[in-house]
Structure formats: C-alpha cells, structure tokens
Amino acid sequence: MFGWLRPWSPLDPEAKKWVETHLGWLAYEFGADVFLRRALLLPTAEFFPAAFDGSDDSVQEMYRQVCGYMDVDPADIPLEIYVEKRPIGLMNERGQQVMEGAGGRYHGDRITLNRDEIQTPTRLVGNLAHELSHHKLMGEERIDPRRYDNELLTDLTAIFYGFGVFLTHGVYTWHSLNSFWPGTTLIRPEYMTEPMMCYALAHRAWLLKEQRPAWSRHLSWSARASFRQSLHYLGKMNDSTFRAGTR
C-alpha cells in the first residue's frame, strides 16, 4: 500500500552496479581499510597544513602531500609544471562551461600540469589525486589502459583513497564524451558524475554507520543533496553488493 514511499535508487541500474562492483575490486586490490579506516580527506589545514599561494613551490608541496596520502613516492612519478596560454574554461556542446581549471596529464613516467589552469587548491588536489590514480592503476600495471571505463575507474580510485570531497568540486560534464554501458542503451559517462561520486561516498558513511557525517558539509553545494539521497537510500534499503566485510 505504501510502496510509493520506498526510496528511489540515486543511479540507474548499470551505474549502480558499476560503482558497487568496482568498490569491491578496489578493496581487493588495495585493501578495504584504505576506504573505511583511513581519514576522509578534507580541504582543511588539518590535512593540508602547508600554505598555498599558487607558486610552483606550493604546488609541488601540495603534490607531495597528495602522494603521501596515496602511498606514492613522488620521486617515482615527478610533477612537471609548464606554461601554455589558453582559455581556462572549455565549453561543452551545449555552450556550458565545463572542465574548469587545474588540468593535469599522466604520461607514465611523470605528471604534467599547466600552470595557467591552476584555479583553486581544492580543485588542484582533486586533479592531482585523479592523475596519481592513473599511476596506481596503470603505472602499477593493475589494469589495461585501453579498458572502456579507464577514466571512471580512475575517479573512483581517487574517491577510494579519500579524495571524494575534492572531486565533487571539479566534476567533468562533457556530454559529447558519453557512450553507453556495454550491452545497454543506458548512458555511460566518461568520468564519474556527481551522483556516482556521492553514491560511492555514501557507502563509506553507510558502512561506518554515520547517519549525518560532519565531513559532508565540505561537499560542493550541488553534491550535498545527491549525497543525502544516496545515504538515505542505502540506510533504508540496505541495497548494495559492496559490504567490505563490515556488515
């Protein structure tokens, strides 16, 4: 009679299955404790105490801090900063500004960063975590770089290592890059959408029984509603294949 009150899944079935399945894969590869027992990183002095003034030195110091949180020796994958003048804001096919600021590139033996794309330290941290996740996956030969969900898994790896709050402040929304989940007509984004990020983050709160985690206030404004919906869904429906041995 009251079935209509049941919470709705925040993701379509294929995106939901992908997030849950790959959280499990990451737990197998890196250990569930990375996701559940380490501190979730926040844009505060507690986690990033070094002053940031946009200089090369401060960017390199931030890079060393991000490397430390991701168990990477920065000497193994140095960061090179270069200057290439170009417009900061790129436009998608609908005329919307997207992919703004702090663009980096993973080259296998190094990461490069365009100085003119450094916008805010929050977005910079998320971008560095994304590029270092490429190193964790491809540099450590855990995946084939040609796999269809390479960028999705790279985003999820950064979230798994505690950088989810930062990624919500720099979501890629270039719709022309979208494809379809294999064997379906459901849209598959090239990078994780905001709801996908929040659904992954909600698993941490759900599994640790955090009903109103204080850290959620650091999410981007638009992500907070998605996070609350995801956590409400998981709490009420108990519907996820990813448990990480905690429930």
Image (cartoon, grey):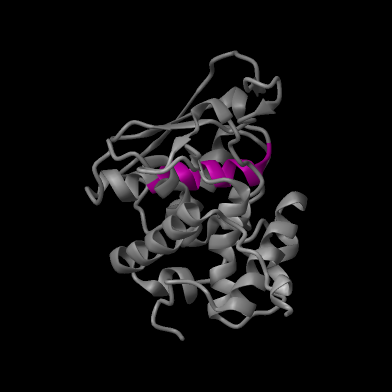
Residue 224 colored in magenta in the image? no
Could you tell me residue 153's position as x and y percent?
Answer: 40, 49
Looking at the rendering, which quadrant does residue 119 occupy?
top right
Q: Which region shows up in magenta?
A: 120-133
- Taking the view exactly as shown, the residue that stands out farthest to the front is 1
- Taking the view exactly as shown, the residue that stands out farthest to the top is 85
**Which residue shows up at 36% across the image and 53% down it?**
72
User: In screen coordinates, is 236 left or right of 196?
Assistant: right
Work out whether residue 50 or residue 131 is closer to the camera in this orientation and state it. 131
**Which residue shows up at 61% across the image and 23% down it?**
116
User: In screen coordinates, is 205 left or right of 219?
Assistant: left
Could you tell me residue 90's position as x and y percent?
Answer: 63, 21
Q: Is residue 180 visible?
A: yes
Quadrant where the N terminus lies? bottom right
User: In screen coordinates, is 107 left or right of 56?
Assistant: left
**Which residue shows up at 48% across the image and 71% down it?**
240
Could you tell me residue 219's position as x and y percent?
Answer: 70, 56
What secondary structure prevails in the magenta region? helix
In the displayed structure, 37 sits above or below 69; it is below
